[in-house]
Image (cartoon, rainbow, N blue to C red):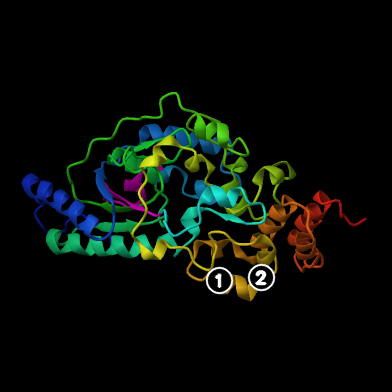
Amino acid sequence: MPLSILDGMSAPNPTSLVQLASDIKAWGKALGFQQVGIADIDLAEDERYLSAWLGAGRHGEMGYMERHGLKRARPAELVPGTLRVISARMDYLSAAAAPAESVLDDPSLGYVSRYALGRDYHKVLRSRLATLADRIATVAGNYGGRACVDSAPVLEKALARNAGLGWIGKHTNLLSRTAGSWFFLGEILTDLALPVDAPTTAHCGTCTACIDVCPTQAIVAPYELDATRCISYLTIELKTAIPIEFRKPMGNRIYGCDDCQLFCPWNKYAQPTAEADFAPRHGLDAPGLAALMGWSEAEFLAKTEGSAIRRIGHEAFLRNVAVALGNAPTSAQVLAALKARQEDPSALVREHVAWALAQHGDARP
């Protein structure tokens, strides 16, 4: 619904707003969110960080990060009338998925970030948030509200932190003492002056596990991520050739990277999701790399239907798989899978296949 200031209506009194805030949290949990909080829209400190991060070029080819400028830190400029942000989290780690560590330890398999194994989270969260927004409307009447799941350029982690859902860890992900970090975030921007929740305190302490384990040293300092070095960026956001210096460190990661979460001590408190939509599809929790290299575009589209993986396209998918095969032990199966793509129509795929074959001492002149 469009955002507007309660036209022609008296604003709810403070008592009713307190009750409404309590109801919103209860309704959110009934819709499958594990936690809901409310924040104001003051992100001045985060805006300074964003400005410096963009100025340093650490967003790489993610032009959308700067397209909206500092509106990301100014919700009221993005959607006029915004006074509060309702922030919600939903756990996504599926107990049905193959153990992440066992997949990473098997170079014949491809590793897909655990968030992308099931249905595209944008679709799941967006529909739930829209339902929550409609429920609020039945009580608040002509209020303004816009549901967002990566669909509006807002600093969702900073807003979730301010809403009491956790703190931003040294790896720049949101962390909860009771839930770790395996969760999605979504927001509703609203013009209702709801009471806000208190932010939580940070609890990373002296731990540097995420920094130490990052395969490409993308966490260049505590709380500072250089996206251009991050495997998630390289395999998902980057549309061109993967820099050679990062190909070996990528190992068998073909879509995203979870290492900073896998080795974070707080994730021992993470709970498996009950959402069937987040269960693995098409065996992508532990897929064989050689078989993936043989996927036609039609197979890729069919087996990633409704998945976040589809957004990178078949060409980038094969590029990523080729790098992983270059890092796999030499075998007849690996060589056959790569050689079958030597004449691929895509120059991008051919270049990465040539690199991979060279790793096995089978380079062409």
Residue 1 can be seen in this image: no
Q: Can you give x and y, in whole percent of width and height, for residue 242 in the image?
A: 69, 49
The answer to whether 153 appears left or right of 286 in the picture is: left
| Residue identifier under label 1 | 303
Q: Which mark is residue 295?
A: 2
* Other residues around mark 2 within 10 Å, as few (<14) / some (14–19) / many (≥20): some
Label 1 sits on what residue type?
Lys
Compare residues 325 and 69 and report the one nearer the observer.
325
- Considering depth in this image, is 276 or 168 the residue closer to the camera? 276
Callout 1: helix, strand or loop?
helix
Question: Quick check: is 75 in the magenta stretch?
Answer: yes
Q: Residues within 10 Å of mark 1 (few under 14, many from 20)?
A: some
Q: Residue at x 62, y 56 (%)?
A: 110
Q: Earlier in the sequence, mark 1 or mark 2?
A: 2
Does the residue at mark 1 contact the one at mark 2 (Cβ under 8 Å)? yes
Q: Which picture quadrant has residue 352?
A: bottom right
Q: Residue at x 62, y 41 (%)?
A: 229
Q: Amino acid at mark 2?
A: Trp
The vertical placement of 108 against 181, above or below, is below
Quadrant in the rendering for residue 292: bottom right
Q: Is residue 226 above or below residue 330?
A: above
